[in-house]
Image: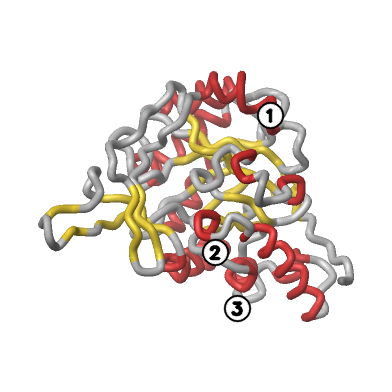
Amino acid sequence: MTKVNLVVDLNGLKLQNPVTTASGTFGFGPEYKNYVDLDRLGGVMVKGTTLEPKLGNPTPRIAETPAGMLNAIGLQNPGVDHFLARILPLIKDYNFKTIVNISGNTVEDYAKLANKLNVDGVDALEINISCPNVKKGGLAFGTQPEMAASVVEAVRAETDMTLITKLSPNVADITSIARAVEEAGTDIISLINTLLGMKIDIHRHEPILANKMGGLSGPAIKPVAIRMVYQVAQAVDVPLIGMGGISNAEDAIEFFLAGASAISVGTANFVNPEVTMEILDGIEKYLVEKGYEDINEIVGLAIK
């Protein structure tokens, strides 16, 4: 196969290719080492990390839906100190960029996390202001421009590291949130997180998830994600990482054409743990067949 350039430069965060994995769907990376050549990935957005360990929400907290999945995990994770002491040493020498997804109950929590994670081996922070499955923080910060900006400003004050802000689709106008976090200092925007949804057991007459509601992901949300990437790409100047229902190379290419400079694969990892490698090969094949020499040539081509 003819070699094409797959390197993308996201406001200083240089990825060897535009394929990353979405937080919460790929563990910390090594969990997939038997299925994926981790050194080929552009980046890994590690499992959501908080100041203190979290057990997450009560079970059941996952339910399948047509063309998707509902989850209400609730940010279960071992906490930032465990990540720094036990996990970062295991992943920092891979070729992929290590992007730590951070969440907090308060604005101060985000700032403290940024301070702690300002260490060698962490390449960027993904600020999660869009998780729909926690009672404090999360989505509460991501639905109002002023609140979203306050979190980014607090994190920016603690670190010069590349900041990625992950936006929620559970808003009326995602472009206003995007502009607010851009003005507050984010370097990159990732979108979209999950859509709030529910599934009811018709025999027991009650919601299936213990949390009652959860975040919908998978192919069902791809058209929403494509639309929002398309809108945000025209509203801001910072690069975008598109995600939401990407299951194959064709899906990924749609996101590039809509204006994303990189993509992130989430729920599809559960269905096919080798999907990121297939998508990477498929992107290169598409570029060769269409006569492009550089992935960056197709970013935003669908925007007229």
Quadrant in which the N terminus appears:
bottom right
Residue 277 marker = none
Q: Amino acid at mark 2?
A: Ile
User: Which tag, 1 or 3, sits closer to the chain's start?
Assistant: 1
Q: Vertically, is 91 above or below 36?
A: above
Residue 96 image point, x, y percent: 72, 43
Of badges 3 and 2, nearer the viewer stands 2
Residue bearing mark 2? 246
Residue 304: give its label. 3
Q: In the rendering, at what x and y percent does residue 120 appear?
A: 72, 25
Closer to viewer: mark 1 or mark 3: 1
Name the N-terminal-most of marks 1 and 2.
Answer: 1
The disc placed on residue 90 is 1
Left or right of 212? Residue 157 is right
Image position of 258 with respect to 140: above or below: below
What residue lies at 89% left-to-right and 71% top-to-bottom?
Answer: 2
Image quadrant where one finds the C terminus:
bottom right
